[in-house]
């Protein structure tokens, strides 16, 4: 039996709580990614560096993993495949594929990847597809998911078993993932407005402009006054243009020079910027010190923030583990090997290694003391 041959779909089970699917009729689309929304999320990463840095930190902190198969003789072949499988046009290794897959999942709320086979069915490469390359729709039942290549959902994929799709925090009854950047466009726009206004204020106040006022004496003729104003303007312009040396401006009469905007005070923007950054950091679940934000925090608070980040990464790992297992099982099946695999993730940080080692040491000492008490007793 060919691995990638079409199989007859079993009849989908009925769902009693579904309110949108009509019996005998293709139900309406429940996945509708808006390209404008996806572009907005990408522009947020480009325009707000702290958001892009937070997502990159999450990708780097995800950690490494190993895939173990039940057949020990096939472990070497599986390790070579995981390390050497081509990814896209320039990448190599499944870790490269998973990093891009995870980055897309965080940004768009949906990640799409494909296992590219040779003509004989063996795995040739892995490909990270755009998030809008595949549309999800329900079949005869809400739990029967169909993968389509067009936004209208009328052209199903010929080999959906080769495509991996992961949704982040989908809403009940829908097939739409939720990006970690949802809710940030408003606060990000507010932050950009503050930065834009600060830049304009510094352009006005930093590049000093002067107001030169000449008050002609009483009884002076209009012609002489205009001539004197023209001479003052020429001399002032010459003094300001000559940047090679310091020039003095000498004038006769009642002439006053005042810096424009010197009396006004630039609004303090540190507090509103911090409030906005706090909302962004809270949404992305990143400790502030990882983003270079030196806010006042104790060592105990930093440890608690690190524990919260660890739980977030564990959740993301649970979403990526089925994708890794699916790729490994596909390779082992095409190689006619036992497809039973398991994914082992490394500890998230060296601090975890230290705490685990200390815990094992304490347990060993406690066991030794208990054994000594039993012998003496």
Image: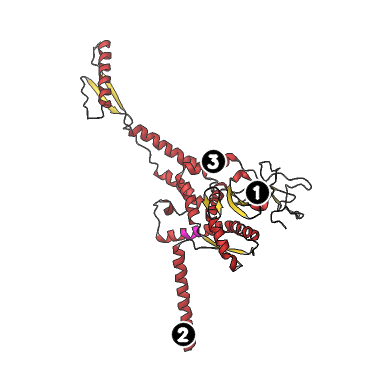
Q: Which of the 4 image quadrants contains residue 302?
A: bottom left
Alpha carbon separation for disc pair 2 and 1: 60 Å
- Mark 2 and mark 1 in contact? Answer it, CB < 8 Å: no
User: Does label 3 or label 2 sit earlier along the sequence?
Assistant: 3
Alpha carbon separation for disc pair 3 and 2: 66 Å
Q: Where is residue 283 shown, x and y percent of the image? A: 51, 50
Which stretch appears magenta?
A: 306-310
Q: Is residue 178 above or below residue 307?
A: above
Q: Which of the 4 image quadrants contains residue 200?
A: top left
Q: Is residue 136 above or below residue 365?
A: above
Residue 309 is one of the magenta-drawn residues = yes
Q: Which mark is residue 372?
A: 2
The residue under label 1 is 175
Q: Where is residue 275 shown, x and y percent of the image? A: 45, 46
Q: Where is residue 291 shown, x and y percent of the image? A: 43, 51
Label 1 element class: loop
User: Does label 1 or label 3 sit earlier along the sequence?
Assistant: 3
On screen, residue 96 versus residue 71, left or right, reads left
Quick one: quadrant of the N terminus?
Answer: bottom right
Q: Where is residue 110 shown, x and y percent of the image? A: 59, 49
Crowding at mark 1 (Cα within 10 Å: few <14, some 14-19, many 20+): many
Q: Nearer the viewer, residue 224 or 328?
A: 328
Q: Which mark is residue 40?
A: 3
Alpha carbon separation for disc pair 1 and 3: 20 Å
Residue 345 is one of the magenta-drawn residues = no
User: Does label 2 or label 1 sit earlier along the sequence?
Assistant: 1
Q: Which mark is residue 21?
A: none
Q: According to the image, what is the colour scheme of the structure? A: secondary structure
On screen, residue 82 versus residue 278, left or right, reads right
Q: Which of the 4 image quadrants contains residue 343?
A: bottom right
- Mark 3 and mark 2 in contact? Answer it, CB < 8 Å: no
């Amino acid at each position: 039996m060919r691995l990638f041959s079409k199989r007859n779909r079993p009849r989908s089970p009925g769902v009693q709580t579904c309110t949108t699917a009509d019996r005998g009729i293709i139900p309406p689309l429940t996945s509708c990614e808006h390209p404008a929304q996806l572009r907005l999320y990408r522009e947020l990463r480009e325009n707000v560096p702290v958001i892009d840095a937070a997502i990159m930190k999450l990708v780097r902190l995800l950690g490494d993993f190993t895939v173990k198969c039940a057949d020990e003789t096939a472990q070497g072949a599986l390790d070579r495949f995981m390390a050497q499988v081509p990814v896209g046009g320039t990448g190599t290794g499944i870790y490269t594929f998973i990093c891009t897959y995870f980055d897309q999942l965080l940004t768009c709320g949906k990640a799409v990847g494909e296992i590219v086979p040779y003509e004989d069915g063996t795995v040739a490469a892995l490909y990270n597809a755009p998030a809008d390359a595949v549309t999800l729709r329900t079949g005869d039942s809400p739990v029967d998911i169909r993968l389509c290549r067009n936004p209208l959902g009328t052209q199903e994929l010929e080999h959906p078993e080769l495509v991996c799709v992961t949704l982040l925090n989908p809403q009940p009854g829908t097939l739409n993932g939720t990006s970690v950047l949802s809710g940030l466009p408003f606060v990000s726009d507010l932050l950009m407005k503050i930065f834009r206004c600060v830049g304009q204020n510094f352009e006005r106040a930093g590049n000093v402009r002067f107001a030169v006022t000449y008050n002609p004496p009483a009884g002076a003729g209009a012609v002489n006054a205009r001539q004197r104003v023209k001479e003052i303007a020429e001399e002032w312009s010459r003094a300001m243009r000559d940047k090679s040396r310091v020039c003095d401006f000498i004038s006769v009469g009642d002439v006053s020079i005042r810096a424009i905007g010197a009396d006004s005070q630039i609004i303090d923007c540190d507090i509103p910027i911090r409030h906005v950054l706090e909302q962004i950091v809270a949404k992305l679940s990143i400790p502030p010190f990882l983003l270079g934000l030196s806010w006042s925090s104790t060592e105990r608070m930093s440890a608690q923030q690190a524990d919260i980040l660890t739980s977030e990464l564990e959740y993301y790992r649970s979403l990526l583990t089925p994708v890794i297992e699916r790729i490994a099982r596909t390779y082992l099946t095409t190689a006619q090997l036992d497809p039973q695999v398991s994914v082992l993730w490394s500890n998230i940080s060296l601090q975890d290694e230290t705490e685990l080692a200390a815990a094992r040491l304490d347990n060993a000492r406690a066991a030794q003391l208990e054994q000594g008490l039993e012998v003496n007793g």
